[in-house]
Amino acid sequence: MTKRLPNIAVLGATGVVGREILNILEEEKVEYNSIKFLASSRSAGSLIEFKGQKHTVIETTDNVFDDIDICLASAGGKTSERYAPVAKEKGCVYIDNSSAFRMDKDVPLVIAGVNDEDLKLHKGIIANPNCSTSQLMLPLKALDDKFKLKRLIVSTYQAVSGAGLKAINELTDNIKTNLVGMPYEPSAFKYEIAFNVIPQIDSFTENGYTKEEMKVTNETRKILHLSNDVKISCTAVRVPVYIGHSEAVTAEFEHEISPDVARALLKETPEVEVRDDSATFTYPTPKEAAGKNPVYVGRIRKSLAFDNGIDFFCVADNLRIGAALNTVRIAEKVIEMELY
Ligand code: A2P
């Protein structure tokens, strides 16, 4: 019997991640019956080009979910809090890019290719991890499977596109203003982002870490099914880069590990690309990673701080693996595994 192909929708189709979802849907072979483009009343009625044809953007209301099987949503936490329960009620599988439901025990938090089996436990909502968590999961899963993770210290260097269209425009305006020596009043960020770095992403929590930093800690634990004995700490920093998050990672393991063995393992890990040769100054940078799908790893070396530890640098396109690509791949898995 041939399976029934799903009716899909992209919610937040006019946003930075939404547009990237459309680019990736054009590249990847996702099988669907029909597709809808949803946003708020602000852009309802505008036209979106997809696969060479113009489509009208539809305002998101409760009723639009009546005949949608899978919704790929990237329209912020408030929108998801409003519509995910409605979609779920109407039998639609809601794949959410926001942080609204990520730590909910009934909501699988999935990186395609890392913990696909968790998808089977979904009850209508599936969450896509935070961008800085996402890119780390592919290399870390391979390393944890073999050497058993004991401690993880991550410092992020995050691109402005992670904060949406307004933040991207602010970096450009801020640079232009600075170059002509004029004062600039930031609004997307607390401080000027041009020629600067800002050690705050999202708001502060009671323990002194920011929400972004706690997302890396808690989401990593949930995705890799790690016990509380594994200690994780993160410092998240915004840098004046448009696309591509970078992460300096120190990982300590239960078992002995060497840079050569880790390098060989990561070279064989799907979707991970090792760029690591100090003799030829080969290492990943966000400029090269932008627009590409893999997670790039380099600067792999023995940690001087921990016995069974390695340090490495990990770079990826935050809009792709960190958001849109994983959302599309989750949708592909849901279709493949017939979970809709
Ligand atoms: P709209 O274009 O109508 O504002 P970004 O993160 O790049 O700012 O994008 C946010 C995306 O989420 C946009 O597509 C935006 O649509 C959409 N969005 C924001 N609020 C809502 C809402 N209340 N209902 C539906 N879509 C929304």
Image (cartoon, rainbow, N blue to C red):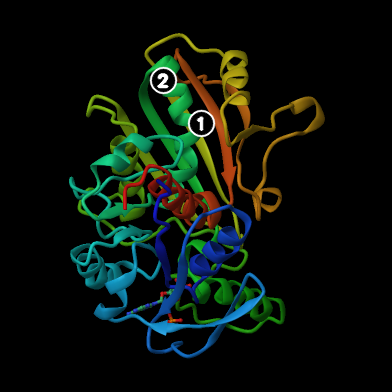
Q: Which mark is residue 139?
A: 1
Query: Where residue 324 sits in the image (x, y, percent)?
Result: 50, 57
Residue denoted by label 2: 145
**Extreme front residue here?**
1
Q: Is residue 135 or residue 177 the one in the foreground? A: 135
Q: Quadrant of ligand 1?
A: bottom left
Q: Is residue 130 left or right of residue 298?
A: left
Residue drawn at the location 34% of the way across and 80% of the way down: 60
Q: Is residue 283 or residue 1 the one in the foreground? A: 1
Residue drawn at the location 56% of the way across and 30% of the way down: 312
Q: Mark 2: few, some, or many residues within 10 Å (few <14, many ≥20)?
A: few
Residue drawn at the location 63% of the way across and 56% of the way down: 27
Query: From the viewer's perspective, is residue 104 above or below residue 20?
Result: above
Q: Is residue 244 left or right of residue 206?
A: right
- Mark 2 or mark 1, which has the lower sequence index? 1
Query: From the viewer's perspective, is residue 72 above or below residue 226?
Result: below
Query: Where residue 52 sits in the image (x, y, percent)?
Result: 67, 74
Residue drawn at the location 41% of the way across and 79% of the way down: 39
**Secondary structure beneath label 2:** helix
**Extreme top residue here?**
256
- The reply to whether the C-beta atoms of the residues labelled 2 and 1 are less than 8 Å apart is no
